Every structure is written in C-alpha cells, then in structure tokens.
Amino acid sequence: MILGSRLIHIVEDDGDIREIVRYALRSSGYDTEGFENGAGFLEYVYKNPLPSLILLDIMLPGEDGFAVLKKIRAASMTKFIPVIMLTAKGGEYDKVKGLDSGADDYISKPFGVMELISRVNAVLRRSFGFQEKSETFSCGGISLDNSKREVSVNGREVRLTYKEYELLYYLMLNSGIVLNREKILSEIWGFDFEGESRTLDMHVKTLRAKLKDAGKLIKTYRNVGFKLGD
C-alpha cells in the first residue's frame, strides 16, 4: 500500500467547515480532497491514490461516521490509514466509541485551526511510526505479529479491538520498562480528554481479561503506569 505522502481526505457534510479545513491544511503544505458524505468518499478512495490521513465527521447524511470508519478498518487497503474523528459530539461515550472503533484521535467542534494542524501532524508522526514496523514479538507465551496485526497466547488466537492491539503492541515494544500513564496516552490516544485515566484503565482491564493467565504479565505501578514482563 502506497499512501499519498501529503494527501488528506476530509469527509464533512458542512461545506463551510470543509472549506475552512481544506484551506488550513493547504496553507500547512498538505494536499486535500473533500467529500460531503461517506458514500462518495468510499467510492473515491478505492479507485484513487490513498491518503495519508482521513478527517471523518460523525454526523453525515446516509451512513454516519462510525459506519464509514468500520468499513475503512475492514478493508485491507485502507485499514492502516490513520483517522481523526471530527464532530460536534463531545461526550466521553462518543469519544471512547470512536477510539475503540479504530479512530486515532477525536476533535470536538468548535475547534481552532492551530489545534487541528497540531493534531494532524501528531497523528501522522505516531501512525507512520507504527506502520513502518513489522516485527514479531513474544513475551511469556504472548506472541504478536505486527505485520499481520495478529496476537496469540500459547498458540491460541486472541481477538483485540484496534486500541487494545495498539496498547499491547506498545507495551511489548517496551517490554520490561515501566511506562507512565501520560506517555501511554500520548502514544496510543494522542490527546487529552476528560476521563482519560478511566479509559486507559478500562483498556488494560479488558486486555488482561482477553489474554487470560498471560494478562498477569501486565503489571500496574500505582500512581505511575504499567509494564509488561518481569
């Protein structure tokens, strides 16, 4: 898969917002394509050079952003493209739902142009850092093949959500090192929002449960963070 190195797709039904975002991105050196609904975007993206990043509104006519995101993550050619959800919905539930569905960041409207550009730059740095790696890791019976995004425990396949996988990958990449909460949140979620600690704790809890006995390898360091391995 070859990604357009400076190309960003904007899926936003509000024409004024779409043009403001396109202008801001172009002023920062990015190429852009704009779409007013998910159907038009999906039809286009599978037939043209792939973008480096997708800005995706939730409240779209026809299929909403969550449904479009599900299709992006299900298709082999687009599943690794980073996505930032861009929406008027700002509740914690919507943020968690978007992130667990595979979004890389979440920006609530109204937003500042400088904030938007900063988030775009940060997600691109972080996401391409993950994509460039294709190592296989193992720790205490846990095996992770990053090129296939597959996880197993003692040969048993483990199905993880998008963020659970990235959390485990980051822990295995830094096996034996205590990672503080702020570092994990910055690398995996990429931004701060109310309830962030609860979200991290929730993902650690569900990840441990899915790993079963091997989940005990994820150690909690009170008031500090987490570590994988002894």
Image (spheres, rainbow, N blue to C red):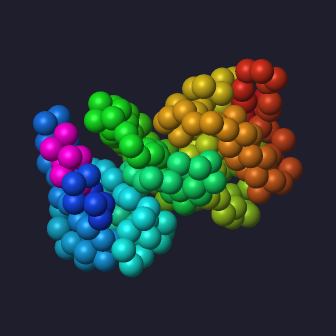
Is 86 contained in the magenta span? no
* The quarter of the displayed image where residue 127 is located: top left
On screen, residue 28 versus residue 119, left or right, reads: left
Q: 39 or 150, which lies in front?
A: 39
Main SS category, magenta section: helix
Query: Residue 103: x, y in percent?
Result: 48, 53
State the residue at coordinates (74%, 46%): 202
On screen, residue 203 versus residue 132, left or right, reads: right
State the residue at coordinates (64%, 44%): 168
* Residue segment shown in magenta: 18-24
Q: 64 or 102, which lies in front?
A: 64
Q: Is residue 99 visible?
A: no
* The quarter of the displayed image where residue 107 is located: top left
Query: Residue 163: x, y in percent?
Result: 58, 50
Reply above or below: 86 against 34.
above
Query: Residue 53: x, y in percent?
Result: 31, 51
On screen, residue 35 versus residue 143, left or right, reads: left
State the residue at coordinates (17%, 68%): 48
Total tally of numbered discs in the picture: 0
State the residue at coordinates (34%, 66%): 77
